[in-house]
Amino acid sequence: MLVLNRRPGESIVIEPDFRVTVLSVTERRVWIGLCVDGASVTLRVCATVVSEDMARLEIVPMSGVQFVGDRVRITMATELDPAGAARAGLAIDRRPGERVEVGEDVWVSVASVSKGNPTVTFGGSAIGDELSITLIRPAGSYVRLGVDAPNRRVYREELWDSVQAELAAGSVTG
């Protein structure tokens, strides 16, 4: 697991096309934004520990939710959708392994809760191999993100931007 400190507005990039941005950090809550390039997936997610074996997942934006047994599926809201403009979302307590499906091609789950730190896992056809982000206790104005992305490179956004600029200028070979 790679651990990086990030402040609100700072991102990490997971090759080839996954970006995680810290949106806000408070004493007990961290909101992260997730964007998958090439897919219409942009989520805001928060995970807060509610017990030793459960975390509350908050996922925004959504325009609808379906419950079928233990299965939960939300429909993504678009910016033009009134629910998207209102930042409507779902808050649901989940045990490790219980997923929330987001549309047809993404799912979010609580992978574990350890020492008060929730680990959120993302997967689905839009993401490919599972990615896990551990929200390690916020410290003041920043949070430590533990990233587990097998077979993928992980960059601080500022380093990613620098490498991409050098590649575009032809001074670095991939």
Image: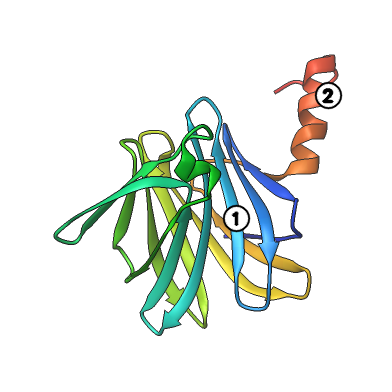
Residue type of the residue flagged with mark 2? Glu
**Res. 154 in view:** no
Q: Residue at x 53, y 49 (%)?
A: 86
Q: Quadrant of the C terminus?
A: top right
Q: Position of residue 59 (x, y in %)?
A: 46, 55
Q: Nearer the viewer, residue 87 or 118?
A: 87
- Disc number for residue 53: none
Say whether residue 136 is left or right of residue 78: right
- Helix, strand or loop for disc 2: helix
- Disc number for residue 166: 2
- Disc number for residue 32: 1
173 lies above or below 55: above
For marks 1 and 2, the one nearer the N-term is 1
Q: Residue at x 51, y 83 (%)?
A: 115
Q: Residue at x 43, y 64 (%)?
A: 57
Quadrant in the rendering for residue 15: top right
**Res. 58 in view:** yes
